[in-house]
Image (spheres, rainbow, N blue to C red):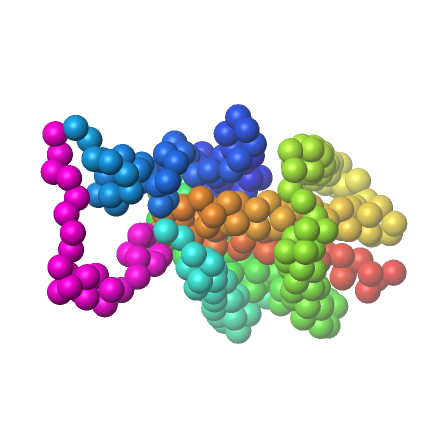
């Protein structure tokens, strides 16, 4: 199964014919310590009989045994596999960069036509960096952090504009985003939500329909004037905003599943940057939808 986030659409994190998740590599033979490791026969791990022609194993003397037992364990730092700590650290760096950009934009950029133009330009740069990363076969931390910085600048200007029109709206949106994240994490960890193939297909169908609706609304706004399809106010606006938040929560559940599969099946450590990128994309989506939903509720 592939995630809706662009970082997971071109590499690994897939399922085999039996429905088991893997990371774009063949399964390890029975007895291998991790995917890609050699199997029980004729390998450096010495699980079974060696291949024909190799030197049979010998007994170790006490000094060799003592050196082996005193050596450090082959943990994630030695195997180079992704851990949850890697994901947490990279996500903190990515979100911290976005927050830094938002704070700088909030206090430095003006809230006028010039500031809005700069925010739009930052959003376009962030979009380009995100697309470049999505088509790369390996994660590039510079691209991911660059995306976070420019996205943060956009969020800072937009948040200040909303704050001037609806005092406290950004803080309410942040609290709402945190609540959605915490709720989805608890629901996923307790298996109240299970990311199955049917769940994925239904969620993606809703996401495609939602994006098409936003596209039609944008065209109506650009050429018809007024408020487009009227999705900024009233009951329709509340409904669209709620669906947007639910879709953001759906994206989070896919992120959690991909991270869990990556850790379980030995994803390379550098893939934690992609996990952080995916979580940041989902959280930004939820925050923007929350911001719009708060504004509609404050006007009601």
Number of numbered discs overlaid on the protein picture = 0
Q: Residue at x 74, y 68 (%)?
A: 166
Camera-nearest residue between 179 and 109: 179
Magenta span has 68?
yes
From the top left corner, tell me how far across and down residue 196 is, in percent.
65, 37
Q: Residue at x 14, y 47 (%)?
A: 58
Which residues make up the magenta segment?
Answer: 53-80
Camera-nearest residue between 2 and 137: 2
Residue 260 is left or right of residue 142, and the answer is right
From the top left corner, tell me how far across and down residue 268 is, in percent.
36, 47
Camera-nearest residue between 300 and 267: 267
Q: Residue at x 68, y 68 (%)?
A: 175
Camera-nearest residue between 257 and 224: 257
Q: Residue at x 73, y 72 (%)?
A: 167
Quarter containing the C terminus: bottom right
Quarter containing the N terminus: top right
Outermost residue, top side: 17
From the top left corner, tell me how far across and down residue 5 is, in percent.
54, 42
From the top left corner, tell me how far across and down residue 4 is, in percent.
57, 39
Q: Does the rendering let one see residue 215?
A: no
Residue 30 is left or right of residue 88, and the answer is left
Residue 52's place in the image compared with 229, above or below, is above
Magenta span has 161?
no
Q: Does the rendering let one see residue 60?
A: yes
Residue 183 in which image quadrant: bottom right
């Amino acid at each position: 199964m592939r995630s809706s986030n662009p970082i997971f659409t071109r590499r690994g994190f897939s399922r085999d014919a039996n429905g088991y998740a893997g990371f774009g590599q063949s399964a390890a033979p029975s007895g291998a310590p991790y995917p890609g490791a050699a199997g029980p026969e004729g390998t450096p791990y010495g699980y079974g009989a060696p291949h024909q022609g190799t030197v049979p194993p010998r007994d170790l003397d006490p000094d060799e045994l003592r050196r082996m037992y005193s050596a450090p364990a082959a943990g994630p730092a030695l195997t180079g596999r992704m851990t949850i700590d890697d994901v947490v650290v990279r996500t903190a760096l990515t979100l911290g960069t976005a927050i830094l950009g938002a704070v700088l934009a909030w206090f430095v950029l003006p809230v006028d036509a010039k500031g809005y133009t700069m925010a739009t330009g930052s959003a376009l740069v962030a979009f380009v960096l995100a697309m470049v990363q999505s088509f790369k076969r390996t994660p590039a931390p510079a691209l991911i952090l660059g995306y976070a910085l420019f996205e943060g600048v956009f969020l800072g200007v937009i948040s200040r504009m909303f704050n001037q029109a609806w005092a406290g709206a950004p803080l309410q949106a942040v609290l709402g985003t945190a609540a959605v994240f915490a709720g989805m994490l608890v629901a996923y960890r307790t298996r109240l939500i299970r990311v199955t193939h049917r769940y994925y297909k239904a969620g993606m169908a809703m996401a495609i329909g939602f994006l098409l609706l936003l596209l039609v609304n944008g065209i109506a706004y650009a050429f018809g004037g007024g408020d487009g399809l009227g999705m900024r106010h009233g009951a329709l606006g509340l409904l669209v905003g709620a669906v947007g938040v639910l879709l953001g929560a759906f994206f989070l559940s896919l992120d959690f599943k991909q991270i869990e599969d990556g850790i379980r099946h030995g994803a390379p450590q550098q893939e934690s940057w992609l996990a952080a990128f995916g979580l940041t994309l989902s959280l930004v989506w939820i925050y923007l939808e929350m911001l719009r939903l708060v504004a509609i509720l404050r006007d009601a």
